[in-house]
Structure formats: structure tokens, C-alpha cells
């Protein structure tokens, strides 16, 4: 019953009117992540030039360190866009790294990869089942799963790291290079491109956004919203497992601590990238930029010589600031 | 003449250099019910937002009680005795009626704690004074829409409101609730409260209002005592042209023995749908009438698979279909336009195009090389339907929440017409849309029937049901109690009596 009188009539408008109109239409909030990225990058480039911030090796390092976050953030974009959340991703990565390492030691590389991905699949099926079929809020389901996954990983390893000696595995999953390109980048790029196309251009992506935008209306449009949400949980956990396997490859071992606490960086990256925490809106490109931005900030703070404690404070403040700019709901 | 409590003079309001109110005058007398009428986009809401302090006009002055006032915020307006009654939105569902009435102004005990018991007594007294029969101890979530609205009115009056604004107050009320609302409004009028009443329902306006003001395209058209006007005249003032009330129709006749488009046999679902059997023929508009709670909406939702049937059989063109989900019904070539477009019909934060394409995406009809959504085709289809249904928008990439109610409803219709359904189920398709759009929607229904589709239409506006249906079935407590040919019903009164007696 709300009328938008202003938008119903469109008599010819003057140039100045068209100009203001353009700026009204320009949703600058959608681009906050890009602007923040440019600004922070510029500041670091100048201020940290003597510390070698712009050194190609340093930049490469930033990308390498954010690869696991980026990969998980792509899948998290779908979860948040569907108006759900997954807090178990970091713990699942740790569990998958452990399971993979143990399986490789006993049965070889193929078994290791299969076991790692199966771990993700199982966790995803449980998360999805509890959240969509039983109807427990995903916040609680995945918070519980976080404890279960970490606990399991600690238990089966007695909290000890499991070394990985298989060179083929470590080469493929994160330590090797194809020509000049680290395999980590190839994984990140593959997940990013798949995720981007999937959200932007496939029926599945449309249905995720519709489900998150208004689940009732999505259902009335014929979408099986529970199934859509279920799939996002399963994919999320499997990607988290992949991230865990990349940790294992990069660090030549499986350990429950790999990925611990990553869920916060992942969710921050996604929200920074313009995906709504309330669902219905998402961008995988924004997510990737958000993830790299977080890596950039981490790296810059280290180069500035800040202590770990100080880094945490600055990082927290930057994230709150940027999310405040993007995340505020428009007042109608 | 009664004293004037509020006067708005020469009001001008522009948005993006577009003038939406042009030198508008509006005067409200003490103790009158003044209907403010016009199509969507005529400027009614903007004018009322100015009176409520939400917008500030570029030009013009506002006098309340004879004194010029500046209304810079909703608080200013409230301090001047202006209150708007929203539909349920401004109440807290988990609190009681009494708690809601005195929200932020609760009585305090000596310790400074909230004294709920005293507030309940105050509320009881207040409700009795207004002649509203309602237990102030009930939580608002336990109330029907009608009582929520009465609660809102009482809450506004408890804050010494002298001017009440009601926007489409009867949109989701039953007949009895409407009558209760009207008797409260009349009592308030006797007590000197002035009421601004916005509605698209002419019959109600003529029942309750003393005077009317009509706006069109942001300009005053007329202000007049209602006794001096007829419904026809008012509609002409609103539209700026003669209205054709009659929906063009060709009398429907089906040959006996012809296979029905849809046949429902002893369908059951919960308490809302009990042993329902009926047939819908190609080219027919079947009206479904019933009081609120008679299972009209439940019938539609069951048929469409939102709440799938628990037993019974459904045949489409003689073939048995099993409906377990909305997608199943869509594959059986059904479409459903639900009653609440903002909650059920549309994703208001998304664009017209995104909303439009959803059913087609689900049905896989927009696929490009199997895996992609064909955006170009989707956009061109959306354009076609937007033009065909005369949706007023500058682009298909506009967010749906920015459209007026009538245009939003057209998007819901467009999104389902695009699937080329054989059977169209419509639940209150004209609720809250202006007269012009309403006529367009009803004409569209008849055209679809003429093209051989079957339409199932639910409406609580009997006049509309009579205008468009070939046959009417009447529901009570989830069951069909009567079925009538349109030609056997002489008048709206007759149908009304049947419904009340059913």
C-alpha cells in the first residue's frame, strides 16, 4: 500500500535532474569493497614501500596466504546469499587435513583425497539435514559442528600433527608450481570462476538468491528452497574440506589447528564483498576482493611491525568500519 | 460549519524535480470522516506523509487548530495530535494489548518498575470507553488483523490523537471486523475526533465518509460532501474519464460430456480443505466465495502444492496428476497468484526481471546450452510482458519494492502468464490496487478465459466476483456448500445473504 509517487511519473527531466538522478542510482555501497581495496593498497604502497610491500614476492605471498580463505569464502557467498550461515568451516578444514594426512600415510594419495572430500561431504549432509529438514537454525547447528569437528580431529590425532611425506600430494595441493604459477592459485582461480559463473549465470545461482531474498515467495515460485539450502551446506563443507587439504599440502602435514578461527575471516571477506548477511544479495567477485583485502591488511600490519595483539585490534576495526559502510540496510 | 482542525494550503512537493504535489489544498473539519481518494501515484500518500512529518514540503503551509505549524518529524506531528494507523506493523506481537497501548508510557510502581496490572486496568477502561470488546491481557499475536487494528487505534487515541489517518484499513478485514471498525470510527467522530480515510473501496467510502477529496496527478480535483455525489461521479473524478464498469464477456457454455480442464475429487488437506470436489472447464472463470476462514486460500494453496493434498485425486485434462510440490503443479500447467504479493508473490528487494524469470527458471525454460540461464531472452520476455500489462516503470531492472501496489501485482501476474498456464488460480488478485488497475486485471482474466484457459478466482469483493465469474462455488469450513451459475444470481445482496447463511 506504499506508493512511490516519485517513480510513477516520468516527464522529461532537465540535465541537472538527470545528473542527480544518476548519483541516486549509483549504489556506491555496492562498491565499497573495491574502493577500500584501492585506498588501503595505495596507503600501504606508499607507507610500506621501504619495507618491500610492493615486492612481487610479497604480493605473491599475500595471495598464497589468502588462498584457503578465498576458496572457502566463495562457497560461503552461497550460504549467506541463501540467508543461512556456516560457522563450522574452519574446524572442518582442520578435520579434513587430519583425515587426509592419516589416509595418505596408510593407503596412499588417492585414498587421502577421497577421504578428505568424504569428510566434507558427511559434515555437509549432517549440517544440511539438521538445518533444513529438522529446522534447527544453521547458526546453532554449525556452531555445534565446529566443536564436534575440532574435537574429532584432536581425538584421532591426540593433538599431534600428522606429517605428509607424499610429494605428489603436496605438489598438487598447495606447495608446487606449474611453471611460474603456484598450484594454490590454480585452485583458487578454479573455485572462484566456478563459483562466479554458478551464482551469476545458472539456475542454481538464481534460486539461491531468490531463496535468500524471500523464502516464502521463492517457494510460491516453485523453488524447492530446502533442497537449495541443503546443497549450499554440502558444497560449503566440501569446499572447506578442500581448503583443509590445501593447508595440509602447503604445510606438509595435517593438524586440527589448520583453519581454526578461519570462519570469521571468511564471513568478513564475504560481507566486505557486498553479500548481504540477511540473504538475497551476493557477489563472488566482491568476495574474492574482500578475501584478498583481508590478506592485504594482515600483511601490511606485519610489515609495519605491529605485534600480533595490535594486528588483531586494527584488523577488527577495519572490518567493522568497512562492513558498516556496506552492510547498513537501506532505510526506505 | 464545524471548526477546521487541520488545513494544508498550497502544498508543493517535488522528488528529483518531478512535482508530485502541485498546490494542493486539504482541509479537515472537527469530527468528520474525510475520504482522501485517488489512483496509486495520485499523491495521497505523499500528502499524508507531509501531514505526518515524514516529508517536508517545498511550498505551502500547514495549520493545526488554526496555528501554523512546522512538522519536521513524526514526533512533531504526534505532538500536534496527528496519528497514523498502520496495519499491525507498529505493534509488538509478543506483548499484550495493554502493553502495546502504553508502550514507552507504562505506569510505574513505587520502585520504578513497570506496573502491568495498573496498565491493564487503564486499558480495560479505555477499551470500554471506546466500546471495543477486547481482552487487554491477550497477546497481540493471538489477535486477528481486525483486532490488531482496533488496538492500534486505541493506542493512538490514548496519546491524545485528534487526527487519525487510516490507509486502506479494511484491506485484510472480514465483513464483521469491518463493521466493528466502522462503528468505532462513528463513535470517535461523535467525540470530535477527525479521521482521514484512504481507500480504494468505493462502497465503504460511501458508507462511512462525510466528505471526499479527490487527487489526481498531484492536483486537487474536487472536495465535496458525499451526499452530493454518486459512486460513478467519484470514480470519474478519480480516473479523469468515464469508467467502464462492465467487464466484456462472452457467455460461457460447455458441452455436456466435455472433458474438464481440471477435476478435483474428494481432496483433503488439514482443517482447511475437506472433501472438496469440483470441475473447471476450459474457457471458464470459476469464482470461489466464502467468508474469512472458510478455506478459500487453503484450497488454492493445496491445489498448487504449497500444502500438498493429504488425500483425493486431481485430474488435468482427464489425466491423473500427483501434486506434492508447487513445481508439480507448475508442470501440470497451473499457476498461482497468491493473496499477499509482498510476502508470497515477490522478492521485493530484487528487480522486476529477476522476479519475472523465476518460474521459467524453475521449469528450465530459460536454459541456454543446458546449464546457463538465458538472460537476453529473459529480459526481452520481461520487456514484452511489462509493455503488454502496461506496468508503469522506467526499466525492468528496477527493484520491485519501488513500484506501486498495482504495478507490483502486474509483475506477479506477468511472471505467471509467462509460463503459459492452462489453469490460473488467483487469490484476491485486486486487493489494494487502484480502480484503473483493477479493471485491467479483471479484463485480463476474461481475456484468458476467452482464450480457453480456466481461471479459479478467489475474492472477498462480491461485486468483482459477480463481474467476472461464470460459475461460483461457496465454501464453508473447508467444504463446498453450494454451487451456482452466475446467471442464477440476481444481485450482490443475494450472494451476500447466501454467504452469511451458508
Image (tube, grey):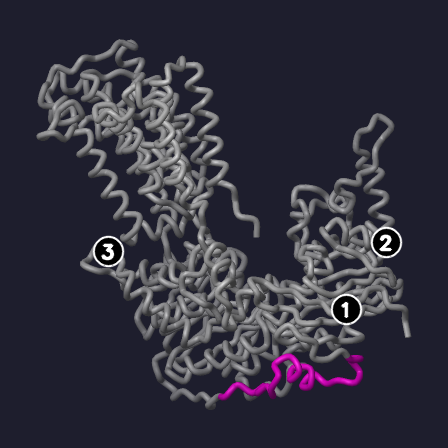
| Residue receiving disc 2 | B128
In the foreground, A152 or B286 = A152
| Residue receiving disc 1 | B9
Residue drawn at x 59%, y 64% is A3
On-image quarter of the C terminus of chain B: bottom right
The CA span between labels 2 and 3 is: 63 Å
Residue drawn at x 50%, y 36% is A324
In the foreground, B22 or B451 = B22
Assess whether mark 3 and mark 1 are in contact (beta carbons under 8 angstroms).
no
Residue drawn at x 38%, y 31% is A40
Magenta-colored stretch includes residue B241 = yes
| Residue receiving disc 3 | B372
Query: Subunit of mark 3?
Result: B
Residue B209, located in which quarter of the rendered image?
A: bottom right
Q: Is residue A159 above or below residue A171?
A: above
Q: Is residue B186 left or right of residue B201?
A: right
User: Any mark on residue B86, and which?
Assistant: none
Q: What stretch is highlighted in magenta?
A: B224-248
Q: Where is residue A11 in the image (x, y as percent from the top left)?
A: 52, 73
Residue B17, located in which quarter of the rendered image?
A: bottom right
The CA span between labels 2 and 1 is: 38 Å
The CA span between labels 1 and 3 is: 57 Å
Q: Position of residue B249 (x, y in %)?
A: 48, 88
On-image quarter of the N terminus of chain B: bottom right
Q: Position of residue B477 (x, y in %)?
A: 58, 63
Q: Earlier in the sequence, mark 2 or mark 1?
A: 1
Q: Are marks 2 and 1 on the same chain?
A: yes
Query: Subunit of mark 1?
Result: B
Amino acid at each position: 500500500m506504499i506508493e512511490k509517487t516519485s517513480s510513477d511519473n516520468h516527464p522529461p527531466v532537465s540535465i541537472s535532474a538527470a545528473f542527480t538522478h544518476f548519483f541516486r542510482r549509483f549504489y556506491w555501497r555496492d562498491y565499497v569493497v573495491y574502493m577500500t581495496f584501492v585506498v588501503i593498497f595505495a596507503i600501504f604502497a606508499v607507507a610500506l614501500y621501504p619495507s618491500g610491500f610492493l615486492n612481487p614476492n610479497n604480493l605473491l605471498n599475500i595471495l598464497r596466504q589468502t588462498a584457503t580463505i578465498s576458496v572457502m569464502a566463495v562457497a560461503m557467498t552461497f550460504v549467506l546469499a541463501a540467508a543461512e550461515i556456516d560457522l563450522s568451516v574452519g574446524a572442518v578444514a582442520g578435520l579434513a587435513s587430519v583425515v587426509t594426512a592419516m589416509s595418505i600415510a596408510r593407503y596412499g594419495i588417492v585414498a587421502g583425497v577421497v577421504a578428505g572430500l568424504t569428510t566434507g561431504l558427511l559434515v555437509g549432509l549432517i549440517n544440511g539435514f539438521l538445518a533444513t529438514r529438522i529446522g534447527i537454525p544453521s547458526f546453532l547447528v554449525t556452531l555445534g559442528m565446529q566443536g564436534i569437528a575440532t574435537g574429532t580431529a584432536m581425538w584421532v590425532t591426540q593433538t599431534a600433527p600428522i606429517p605428509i611425506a607424499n610429494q605428489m600430494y603436496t605438489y598438487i595441493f598447495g606447495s608446487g608450481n606449474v611453471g611460474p604459477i603456484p598450484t594454490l592459485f590454480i585452485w583458487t582461480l578454479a573455485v572462484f570462476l566456478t563459483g562466479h559463473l554458478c551464482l551469476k549465470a545458472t539456475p542454481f545461482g538464481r534460486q539461491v538468491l531468490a531463496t535468500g531474498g524471500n523464502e516464502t515467495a521463492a517457494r510460491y515460485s516453485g523453488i524447492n528452497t530446502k533442497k537449495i539450502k541443503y546443497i549450499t551446506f554440502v558444497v560449503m563443507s566440501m569446499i572447506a574440506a578442500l581448503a583443509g587439504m590445501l593447508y595440509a599440502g602447503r604445510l606438509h602435514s595435517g593438524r586440527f589447528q589448520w583453519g581454526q578461527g578461519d570462519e570469521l575471516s571468511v564471513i568478513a571477506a564475504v560481507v566486505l564483498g557486498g553479500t548481504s548477511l540477511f540473504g538475497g544479495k551476493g557477489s563472488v567477485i566482491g568476495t574474492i576482493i574482500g578475501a584478498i583485502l583481508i590478506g592485504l591488511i594482515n600483511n601490511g600490519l606485519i610489515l609495519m611491525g605491529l605485534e600480533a595483539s595490535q594486528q588483531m585490534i586494527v584488523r577488527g576495526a577495519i572490518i567493522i568500519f568497512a562492513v558498516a559502510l556496506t552492510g547498513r540496510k537501506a532505510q526506505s | 460549519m464545524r471548526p477546521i482542525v487541520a488545513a494544508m494550503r498550497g502544498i508543493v512537493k517535488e522528488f528529483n524535480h518531478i512535482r508530485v504535489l502541485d498546490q494542493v489544498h486539504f482541509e479537515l473539519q472537527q469530527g468528520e470522516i474525510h475520504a482522501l481518494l485517488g489512483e496509486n501515484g495520485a499523491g495521497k500518500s505523499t500528502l499524508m506523509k507531509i501531514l505526518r512529518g515524514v516529508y517536508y514540503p517545498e511550498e505551502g503551509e500547514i495549520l493545526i487548530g488554526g496555528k501554523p505549524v512546522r512538522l519536521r518529524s513524526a514526533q512533531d506531528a504526534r505532538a500536534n495530535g496527528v496519528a497514523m494507523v498502520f496495519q499491525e506493523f507498529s505493534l509488538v506481537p509478543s506483548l499484550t494489548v495493554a502493553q502495546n497501548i502504553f508502550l514507552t508510557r507504562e505506569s510505574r510502581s513505587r520502585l520504578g518498575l513497570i506496573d502491568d496490572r495498573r496498565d491493564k486496568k487503564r486499558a480495560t477502561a479505555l477499551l470500554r470507553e471506546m466500546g471495543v470488546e477486547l481482552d487487554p491481557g491477550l497477546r497481540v499475536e493471538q489477535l486477528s488483523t481486525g483486532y490488531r487494528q482496533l488496538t492500534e487505534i486505541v493506542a493512538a487515541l490514548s496519546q491524545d490523537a485528534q487526527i487519525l489517518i487510516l490507509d486502506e484499513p479494511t484491506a485484510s478485514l472480514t465483513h464483521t471486523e469491518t463493521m466493528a471498525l466502522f462503528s468505532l470510527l462513528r463513535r470517535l467522530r461523535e467525540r470530535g475526533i477527525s479521521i482521514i480515510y484512504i481507500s480504494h473501496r468505493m462502497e465503504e467510502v460511501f458508507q462511512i465518509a462525510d466528505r471526499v477529496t479527490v487527487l489526481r496527478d498531484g492536483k486537487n480535483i474536487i472536495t465535496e460532501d458525499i451526499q452530493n455525489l454518486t459512486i460513478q461521479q467519484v470514480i470519474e473524478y478519480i480516473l479523469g474519464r468515464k469508467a467502464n464498469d462492465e467487464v466484456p464477456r462472452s457467455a460461457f457454455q460447455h458441452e455436456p460430456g466435455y472433458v474438464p480442464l481440471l477435476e478435483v475429487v474428494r481432496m483433503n488437506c488439514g482443517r482447511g480443505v475437506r472433501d472438496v470436489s469440483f470441475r473447471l472447464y476450459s474457457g471458464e472463470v470459476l469464482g470461489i466465495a466464502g467468508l474469512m476462514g472458510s478455506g478459500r486460500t487453503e484450497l488454492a494453496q493445496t491445489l498448487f502444492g504449497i500444502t500438498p493434498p493429504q488425500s483425493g485425486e486431481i485430474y488435468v485434462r482427464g489425466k491423473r496428476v500427483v501434486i506434492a510440490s508447487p513445481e508439480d503443479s507448475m508442470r501440470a500447467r497451473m499457476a498461482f497468484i497468491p493473496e499477499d504479493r509482498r510476502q508470497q508473490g515477490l522478492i521485493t528487494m530484487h528487480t522486476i526481471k529477476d522476479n519475472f524469470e523465476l518460474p521459467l527458471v524453475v521449469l528450465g525454460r530459460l536454459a541456454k546450452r543446458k546449464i546457463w540461464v538465458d538472460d537476453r531472452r529473459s529480459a526481452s520476455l520481461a520487456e514484452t510482458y511489462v509493455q503488454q500489462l502496461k506496468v508503469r516503470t522506467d526499466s525492468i531492472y528496477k527493484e520491485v519494492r519501488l513500484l506501486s501496489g498495482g504495478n507490483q501485482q502486474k509483475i506477479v501476474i506477468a511472471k505467471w502468464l509467462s509460463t503459459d498456464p492452462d489453469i490460473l488460480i488467483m487469490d484476491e488478485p485486486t486487493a489494494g490496487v487502484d480502480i484503473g488497475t483493477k479493471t485491467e486485471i479483471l479484463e485480463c482474466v476474461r481475456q484468458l478465459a476467452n482464450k480457453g484457459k480456466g481461471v479459479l478466482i478467489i475474492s472477498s469483493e462480491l461485486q468483482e466476483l459477480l463481474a467476472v465469474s461464470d460459475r461460483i462455488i461457496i465454501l464453508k469450513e473447508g467444504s463446498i456448500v453450494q454451487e451456482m451459475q452466475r446467471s442464477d444470481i440476481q444481485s450482490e445482496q443475494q450472494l451476500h445473504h447466501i454467504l452469511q447463511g451458508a
